[in-house]
């Protein structure tokens, strides 16, 4: 299961069969930025991450707590 933003975005783009070029064209994020992000060479700004999540129909939700309540 993917757990970082990079892993989630890369996994969804690959699932769709989208190249960095296609994702750049659809999202408005520069292709070179995406290439570096996919390769792990750089992080991505939150506004660009928002564009990618929106383009890929992904949403951010809080993780469920792993702490168990006491009986």
Image (tube, rainbow, N blue to C red):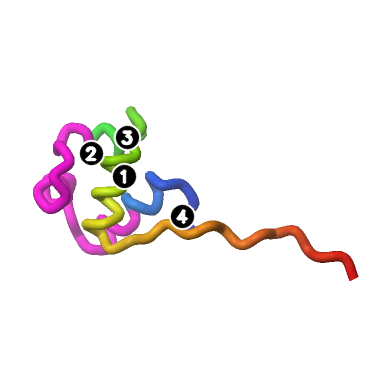
Residue at the bottom extreme of this rendering: 71
- Which percent across, then down, holds residue 4? 46, 47
Residue 2, which numbered label? 4
Residue neighbourhood size for the residue with mark 2, other residues' Cα within 10 Å, grouped as few (<14), some (14–19), many (≥20): many
Residue marked by disc 2 = 34
Residue marked by disc 1 = 49
Residue 27, which numbered label? none
C-alpha gap between disc 1 and disc 2: 10 Å
Q: Point out the frontmost of discs 2 and 3.
A: 3
Local secondary structure at mark 1: helix
Q: Point out the frontmost of discs 3 and 4.
A: 3
C-alpha gap between disc 4 and disc 2: 18 Å
Report the side of 17 relative to 66 (left or right).
left
Residue drawn at (87%, 65%), measured in percent from left and top?
Answer: 70
Q: Earlier in the sequence, mark 4 or mark 1?
A: 4
C-alpha gap between disc 3 and disc 1: 6 Å
Residue drawn at (40%, 49%), measured in percent from left and top?
Answer: 7
Q: Are marks 3 and 1 in contact (CB under 8 Å)?
A: yes
Q: Earlier in the sequence, mark 3 or mark 4?
A: 4
Residue marked by disc 3 = 45
Q: Which residues are magenta?
A: 11-33
Is residue 16 part of the magenta span, yes or no? Answer: yes
Q: Which of the pair 13/63 is nearer the observer?
A: 63
The dominant secondary structure in magenta is helix
C-alpha gap between disc 2 and disc 3: 11 Å
Q: Point out the frontmost of discs 1 and 2.
A: 1
Local secondary structure at mark 3: loop
Q: Earlier in the sequence, mark 1 or mark 2?
A: 2
């Amino acid at each position: 299961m993917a757990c970082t933003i990079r892993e989630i975005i890369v996994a969804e783009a690959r699932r769709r069969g989208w190249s960095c070029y296609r994702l750049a064209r659809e999202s408005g994020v520069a292709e070179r930025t995406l290439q570096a992000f996919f390769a792990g060479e750089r992080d991505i700004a939150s506004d660009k991450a928002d564009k990618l999540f929106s383009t890929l129909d992904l949403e951010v939700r809080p993780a469920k707590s792993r702490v168990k309540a006491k009986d």
